[in-house]
Amino acid sequence: MVTLILLLTTVYTTEEKIQMVLLYLDKHMSLCQIVKNYDLANHNIIGRWVKQYKETGPIIETKIYFS
């Protein structure tokens, strides 16, 4: 018997990622609020985007995240 598991993925555009990062950096929302409002799997995702934004500017990784 074969079991098929369907995973729903959410892909965010670079613009959406930058918007989330700026919401956090400008203190408009906490990491927890962003995770909840944008249905992210956890706060580590936005944390990585914030770190990358601070280090290299607005180029944000393009991985797919499962929520």
Image (cartoon, rainbow, N blue to C red):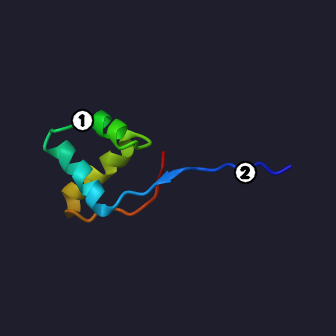
The structure residue drawn at horizontal position 26% and vertical position 60%, both measured from the top left corner, is 15
Tell me which corner region of the image, top left, top right, bottom left or bottom right, holds residue 37: top left
Q: Nearer the viewer, mark 1 or mark 2?
A: 2
Q: 10 Å neighbourhood of mark 1: few (<14), some, or many (≥20)?
A: some
The image shows residue 57 at horizontal and vertical percentages of 19, 62
Is residue 65 toward the left or the right of residue 18 in the image? Answer: right
Q: Eyeballing the image, is 60 above or below 30?
A: below
The structure residue drawn at horizontal position 35% and vertical position 62%, both measured from the top left corner, is 61
Badge 2 marks a residue whose secondary structure is loop
Tell me which corner region of the image, top left, top right, bottom left or bottom right, holds residue 44: top left
Q: Residue furthest right?
A: 1
Badge 1 marks a residue whose secondary structure is loop
Query: From mark 1 to mark 2, how far is it between C-alphas?
Result: 36 Å
Amino acid type shown at disc 1? Ser
Residue sitting nearer the eye, 51 or 17: 17
Q: Residue furthest left?
A: 26
The image shows residue 47 at horizontal and vertical percentages of 31, 46
Identify residue for label 1: 30
Residue sitting nearer the eye, 42 or 1: 1
The image shows residue 41 at horizontal and vertical percentages of 44, 42
N-term-proximal mark, 1 vs 2: 2
The image shows residue 46 at horizontal and vertical percentages of 32, 47
The structure residue drawn at horizontal position 41% and vertical position 40%, both measured from the top left corner, is 42
Tell me which corner region of the image, top left, top right, bottom left or bottom right, holds residue 18: bottom left
The mark total stands at 2
Mark on residue 13?
A: none
Is residue 25 toward the left or the right of residue 11 in the image? Answer: left
Identify residue for label 2: 4
The structure residue drawn at horizontal position 43% and vertical position 60%, both measured from the top left corner, is 63
